[in-house]
Amino acid sequence: MTPGLGKQETIYQIGPITWGILKDLGWNMNPSIFVIAPKNGTSYIVGDSLEIEWFDTNEMGTPIYKIDLYNQEGNLVTNFTPVISGKFGTNSIKLAITSDIPSNVNYQIKLVTYGGDSYNNDGYFQIQNHVAPPSAFPRGDKYAKNTPIKLQSNFANGEIYYTKDKSIPTKNSSKFNSDIILDKDFTLTAKVFVGNNESDTMVANYTVNTDILSGTISCGGEPSWIGKEGMGYSDGKAREYKWGKQAGMVFRSFIEIYIESIPQNVVIDNVIFPILRGYKDSIYTGLYNLDYNGNGTIEKYESFTAGTNTKKIDAYWPQVNNSGSDYDYDFTSDKLTAEVKKAYTEHKTSILFGIKAEDENIGKIFWYNPPSYLYFKSYMTINYHYLPGNYLVDQVDKDKNSFGFVGLWNSSKWDTLLVPITKNFPKGTTQNPQYQYFLASQDYKNGTTQKFRDWKDASIINHRKYNITADKDSIIARFDQSNFATVQNYFEGNVNGGKISFKDPWIVDSVDAKGALNRGVNAVFHDSLPAPFNPGLSSLYKGVFLNQGYNSVTHVWTPPYYSVQATSQQDINLGGSLGTRTFYFQNWGGANVNYQSPNSLETPVVFTAENAVASANYKGHFLSNSSSALTNNGQRKVVRDRFGIYHMVYESMNKLWYTKSTTTNMSGAWTPEEKLLDLGDNTFITNPSISIHATVVGANLDDQLKIVCEVKNGQAEGFDSRTAVRRRRK
């Protein structure tokens, strides 16, 4: 496979990644320079720094002789002659934008090498004499609650600050880094700051739409343009539109708008196409619907006129600002809305639109640079309302996207409702209530590990009765991300074996006349589960929700929440000479978990991170990880009081333990171990000793136990101290 250039073909820049792939494949690639910045559509202010960035594929580096600045008409405006030796890989330099460079003009830079080769950036950037205010998307209006709002500026070095209380933003205000959520009505004010320059204030009013039966959605697409000159074509993609005629070349633009995200069962009210952003002059523009099935640029270019599948939608004069500054214009018409409606009812996933000058002999070109915050995508805004009905039924994922279906009980079976959909339900009264029953999906959302969490009113029962009391309302099943977790026993160093119990409000383990359901806050423990137990993503449990039922700020527990349960003692076969030993419950521990009552056998638990582990900690009777802990009584580890009861202390797992016999028979029953001392993992306890001291209290003797051990901190040689523990004999 050898690259070549045929007749009427165009040479174009392939980009550094493609260049590297072809070189790795063994192609003989000439060294080249790819200009990365300034990016197309960006703006700079007079007095700002113009950062130029390029990628050099010459392993020895390519020295740059000069940098030329051209305007959009192709005229040289000025040049810069910095000393740039060049290196392999990414290079950059900052140049000052001086006041003698004309402002409000589109520019392109060219890097010129000592060999006379030149390399330009993709598209055009603009130098302005003032900072334009930011733009907001969507624009100020009424939208559904929790709609995300983006702020955008084309200034390469600009920072956006905003407020929601009608005050004028400063650099001490909130900086825009992520979506602003429409959680309540507010007035949004925003400014762009570029160095010491700042824009005028953008003001937009946002209102939460309480009319749940209507909505707005933006459908995106990738722009491209085709330029035709003679029989040759120039194909520019994914950065801009242009149409009209320039330097003998006729340009036409295209965009494929993807409409599959429009909800089902809605009526489209109107369509807005905000594609027009111009400069000084206007062109009478035609908008076309192209049923394009070709595979090449020629077919796409000719599709405006060839064949019977092309339909002219409308024509209009774009509105422009004669000062040359940016402007906003939203095109809409009944004909455009009708075309989108038709495609929607035919269940098409996209529409290919074409844009051209109605008079292609006119010597003008029209440009549109899609906003950078849409990742160089353009979009159509579609307003819609649901089909007649007083209740909206929906099922949404964690990002509030509708999917799948909801069950509606119909006498003896569940009917399937593809969502979102509106239904007419008769309103009940106190004397004569009207109920409907709904079922959320019990499977994961397809392609995810999201499962049903609750309904809009916070009920977590998967199928439930809904009392129809309002004139209109919404019934929405909500899904959320589930996560892997483990519930286990920790038998003094051994996590395998034993039994554990777990209570999950979401597990579907009950049944009524309408089928299987979960118990919610009335959930029961599933007892004697083999440990370790994983309510994992492939089990009946389908994972757990994080931070469920516990507020880490107020430390308040609110049902529903998960619970764990241990038994007070378990007999575990350790094998070999150890045989079966009795282990006594101590407390709960683990990783990424919180407990309401960590010292109780039964306690609510919250999982705080993926792969959380809840551990029931047990102490083995007369067991130690120290080989000398129980070998002899040289350190007085066992004493006998005057009543014949034996008392023992020993060290295990870096902790000091105490137990006593319940009879005078040393080989008889003993109490569960009691932890006397725990100084942490890095403090070592050894050589405990115990003695009995009899003291006179009034006319009676009172026995006291005195327990002493040695303590070693960290890795120090020897033991730093001895610790005494006193307690009364019980």
Image (tube, grey):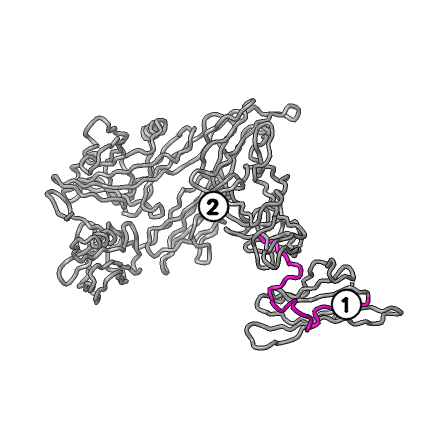
Tell me the CA gap for discs 1 and 2.
71 Å
Q: Nearer the viewer, residue 540 or 167?
A: 540
Residue of label 1:
640
Q: Is residue 192 above or below residue 374?
A: below
Residue visible at 21% across and 32% down in the picture: 304
In terms of image quadrants, where is residue 706? bottom right
Where does the image place residue 582, in percent across and percent down from the top left?
A: 66, 55
**Residue lying farthest top?**
411
SS category of the residue bearing label 1:
strand
Q: Nearer the viewer, residue 24 or 146?
A: 24
Residue of label 2:
181
**Type of residue at label 1?**
Arg
Where does the image place residue 152, in percent across and percent down from the top left?
A: 37, 49
Give the numbered dot on residue 106.
none
Viewer can see residue 48: yes
Residue stretch in magenta:
614-642
